[in-house]
Image (cartoon, rainbow, N blue to C red):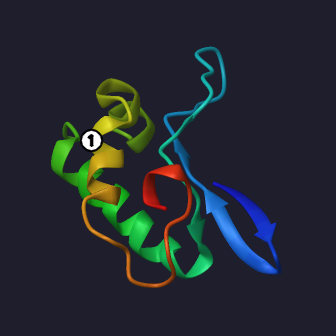
Amino acid sequence: MLGVDKDGSEWYQVSIGGSQGNNSAIGKIIGPSFSGGQMPEVIDRLLQVYVDKRFEGERFVDTAQRLGIAPFKEHVYATPISKGELVGEDHA
């Protein structure tokens, strides 16, 4: 997550699938940024996909790299997140 200040408010850009080491990879941004108040729900939705789609003992990063960001993005944006408004072209 990358935090930014927009007009005195906290906003976060969420990326998943990144890793370090010999098989390093840059995470992919799932979509428009979220307000600080939305982040607990965003994290919960990401973890719901992980728990539902992972193989036993599989780490989050491995699940995300295996599936790609699509199922995570779809679940996060499937219904509005109550605290604050989503921003960006997709949610204007």
The correct choice, above or below, for 41 with respect to 3 in the image is: below
Instruction: Depth check: give the residue in front, 88 or 3.
Output: 88
Q: In this view, does 61 lie to the left or right of 33?
A: left
Residue topped by disc 1: 71
Helix, strand or loop at label 1? It is helix
Number of dots carrying numbers: 1
Residue under the image location 58 percent in, 59 percent down? 33
Quadrant containing the N terminus is bottom right
Q: Position of residue 42 (x, y in %)?
A: 42, 66
Question: Would you call the spot at circle 1 few (<14 residues within 10 Å), some (14-19), or many (20 or more)?
Answer: some
Residue under the image location 38 percent in, 40 percent down? 59
Instruction: Depth check: give the residue in front, 38 or 54.
Output: 38
Q: Position of residue 3 (x, y in %)?
A: 73, 62
Mark 1: amino acid: Pro
Furthest residue to the front?
A: 92
Furthest residue to the top?
A: 22
Q: In this view, does 17 lie to the left or right of 50?
A: right
Q: Where is residue 73 in the image (x, y as percent from the top left)?
A: 36, 47
Residue under the image location 51 percent in, 71 percent down? 39
Q: In this view, does 82 lie to the left or right of 85?
A: left
Residue under the image location 40 percent in, 73 percent down? 41
The correct choice, above or below, for 91 with respect to 72 in the image is: below
| Quadrant in which residue 62 is drawn | top left
